């Protein structure tokens, strides 16, 4: 029901240069009212003719997309079933896809990386690193292209409070990644934040930026919107930056960050958008 779209660079079927991919879930009504369902992928090659944009369904996908199957480390294959899928296009046109999956004991994050022809070249399973508590119920992972084929996955986890955690898959060649052996602990909260955002930017080197809403007593009320930068090892860079506060906004109403989102720019700046209560 929820779709995520992105543009990937590379040569596609028919010689098209970019593709648009949408990943979404098809829920099983018989399974109840939860958000779990089959993870579906629809890829479109983007072509131009006489200056007009066109989309062409890539071979094998079909008009309704294709249900994903994943191959685990032991060689077994199974349909991808979960919720909250996210997708990112890598520099060479590969697709990185993750979703939330329940392994019977907790909610964890699994996924994979697909070549342009749909072949899986990496299996993503963060269960062991995430640990027994799993990710915070109802939250969603963030998946980002970290440049040069690297992949950053982040999520919210309980650990004496609430912590934004991240894992970096480092590219070691075409179709080869060094899997993370430890996690990065980014921003910590006493209470579960109403909303937060993780993005990447570049100013003399890539940096992770976490943006969130916070009041003078802690996280969650929306009096201020702040950000904190981290290097790619998870170490903080400088102090927190106040992006906006209630005085800079309406002077009467705090910011409502139900739709807080941020995007990093190549010059090191970030763009933050949010909703404000009227």
Image (tube, rainbow, N blue to C red):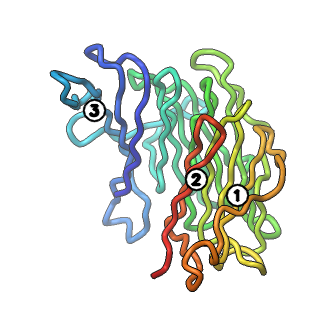
User: Which of disc 1 and disc 3 is earlier in sequence?
Assistant: 3
SS state under label 3:
loop
User: Which of disc 2 and disc 1 is earlier in sequence?
Assistant: 2
**Residue 19, x across and y down, in percent:** 35, 29
The tag on residue 227 is 1
For the residues labelled 3 and 1, say whether their Cβ atoms are less than 8 Å apart.
Answer: no
The residue nearer to you, when weighing 84 against 110, is 84
Q: Residue at x 22, y 31 (%)?
A: 53
Query: Looking at the image, is 194 positioned above or below residue 122?
Result: below
Q: CA distance from mark 1 to mark 2?
A: 18 Å
Badge 2: residue crowd in 10 Å (few <14, some 14–19, many ≥20): many
SS state under label 2:
loop
SS state under label 1:
strand
Query: Looking at the image, is 159 positioned above or below residue 19?
Result: below
The tag on residue 61 is 3
What residue sits right under mark 2 in the picture?
A: 141
The residue nearer to you, when weighing 165 against 176, is 165
Badge 3: residue crowd in 10 Å (few <14, some 14–19, many ≥20): some
User: Which of disc 3 and disc 2 is earlier in sequence?
Assistant: 3
**Residue 102, x across and y down, in percent:** 56, 57
Residue mark closest to the camera, 3 vs 1: 1
Is residue 248 left or right of 183 when viewed as pictured? Answer: left
Q: Quadrant of the C terminus?
A: bottom left
Q: CA distance from mark 2 to mark 3?
A: 25 Å
Q: Residue at x 65, y 79 (%)?
A: 221
**Residue 101, x across and y down, in percent:** 54, 53
**Residue 166, x across and y down, in percent:** 71, 47
Q: Residue at x 49, y 47 (%)?
A: 86
Q: CA distance from mark 3 to mark 1?
A: 40 Å
Badge 1: residue crowd in 10 Å (few <14, some 14–19, many ≥20): many
Location of residue 257 (image quadrant): bottom right
């Amino acid at each position: 029901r929820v779709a995520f779209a992105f543009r990937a660079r590379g040569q596609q079927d028919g010689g098209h240069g970019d593709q648009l991919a949408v990943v979404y879930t098809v829920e099983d009504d018989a399974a109840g009212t939860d958000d779990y369902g089959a993870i579906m992928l629809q890829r479109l090659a983007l072509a131009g003719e006489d200056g007009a944009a066109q989309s062409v369904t890539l071979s094998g996908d079909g008009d309704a997309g294709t249900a994903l199957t994943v191959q685990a480390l032991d060689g077994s294959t199974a349909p991808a079933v979960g919720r909250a899928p996210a997708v990112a296009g890598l520099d060479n046109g590969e697709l990185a896809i993750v979703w939330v999956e329940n392994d019977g004991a907790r909610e964890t994050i699994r996924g994979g990386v697909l070549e342009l022809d749909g072949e899986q070249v990496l299996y993503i399973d963060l269960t062991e690193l995430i640990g027994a508590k799993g990710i915070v119920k109802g939250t969603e992972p963030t998946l980002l292209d970290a440049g040069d084929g690297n992949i950053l996955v982040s999520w919210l986890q309980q650990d004496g409070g609430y912590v934004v955690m991240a894992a970096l898959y480092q590219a070691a060649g075409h179709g080869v990644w060094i899997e993370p052996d430890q996690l990065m602990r980014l921003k910590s909260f006493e209470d579960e934040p109403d909303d937060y955002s993780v993005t990447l930017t570049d100013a003399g080197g890539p940096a992770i930026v976490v943006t969130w809403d916070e009041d003078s007593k802690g996280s969650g009320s929306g009096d201020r919107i702040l950000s904190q930068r981290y290097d790619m090892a998870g170490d903080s860079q400088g102090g927190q930056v106040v992006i906006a506060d209630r005085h800079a906004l309406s002077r009467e109403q705090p910011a409502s960050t139900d739709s807080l989102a941020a995007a990093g720019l190549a010059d090191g700046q970030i763009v933050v958008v949010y909703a404000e209560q009227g």
